[in-house]
Amino acid sequence: MRLLALTLALAVPLAAHAQSDDGVYRRWDTDLAVAIGVGGGAVFQGDRTDASLVVETRLRIIDAAGPVASYRWAPDAGGQLFLGIELRPLWPALFLIDSPTRIEWLDLLIQSFGVELGAVILPLGDPSGVDVDRGVALAIGLALEIPLVVPSRMRGAARGLFLRLAARRVDATVAFRGTPDEVDLSEWSVTATLQLSLGAGVGAIREPPRYRADR
């Protein structure tokens, strides 16, 4: 709670100075954004709780949807690789109906709500007390990103710095894991990652000129 309070204390004052007329916040400077995150969290597997480390990369098309690769490691639970798709529906929806608050920090917080769905390859490494073949499980997650540095305060390719708070459910029962071992590796996990967003892709998406000057 202290970390969250400190984060809000640092980030909220930026909103007073960061506003936009269209609610886009540099998202259309390029057609792709790459988000790189590093952090940690907790894994809840049965009656056991483990601390974990997380490294992830997200490729977002106009910051709305795209593929995700995320590696999670915990001392007793071992490692797992998540490969899936992330969808952030509120940003395009609110833009299309012209309903942003036009306060940059608040818009970015609301529009960062995301859902992810994919497959997890597990176990990787040497999990403590588990002797099973490697398999593939089903995973679904939810997340919200707290802006620490808003896009208008960054230069070059940088699109913002965020604290990403996420929860993920991995269904690794025998039926979903795809192996015959009678071991349930299902889990819940919560993570907090520091995420840097960078503009990438083919180039800027720009509107055509609205007027032509007479020569």
Image: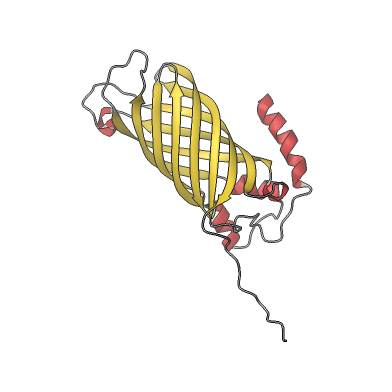
Query: Looking at the image, how many numbered discs can be counted on the residues?
Result: 0
Image quadrant containing the C terminus: bottom right
Colouring method of the image: secondary structure
Q: Residue at x 74, y 35 (%)?
A: 10
Q: Residue at x 58, y 38 (%)?
A: 195
Residue that extends furthest to the top in the rendered view of this protein:
129
Image quadrant containing the N terminus: top right
Percent from the top left, x then y, of residue 213?
71, 82
Q: Quadrant of residue 23?
A: bottom right
Residue that extends furthest to the front in the rendered view of this protein:
215
In this rendering, would 14 be left or right of 186?
Answer: right
Percent from the top left, x then y, of residue 123?
34, 25
Q: Quadrant of residue 186?
A: top left
In this rendering, would 177 be left or right of 115?
Answer: left
Residue that extends furthest to the bottom in the rendered view of this protein:
215
Percent from the top left, x then y, of residue 108?
63, 48
Q: Is residue 4 above or below residue 129?
A: below
Percent from the top left, x then y, of residue 112?
58, 46
Q: Residue at x 71, y 35 (%)?
A: 8
Task: Return the residue nearer the eye: 184 or 41.
Answer: 41
Q: Residue at x 63, y 62 (%)?
A: 98
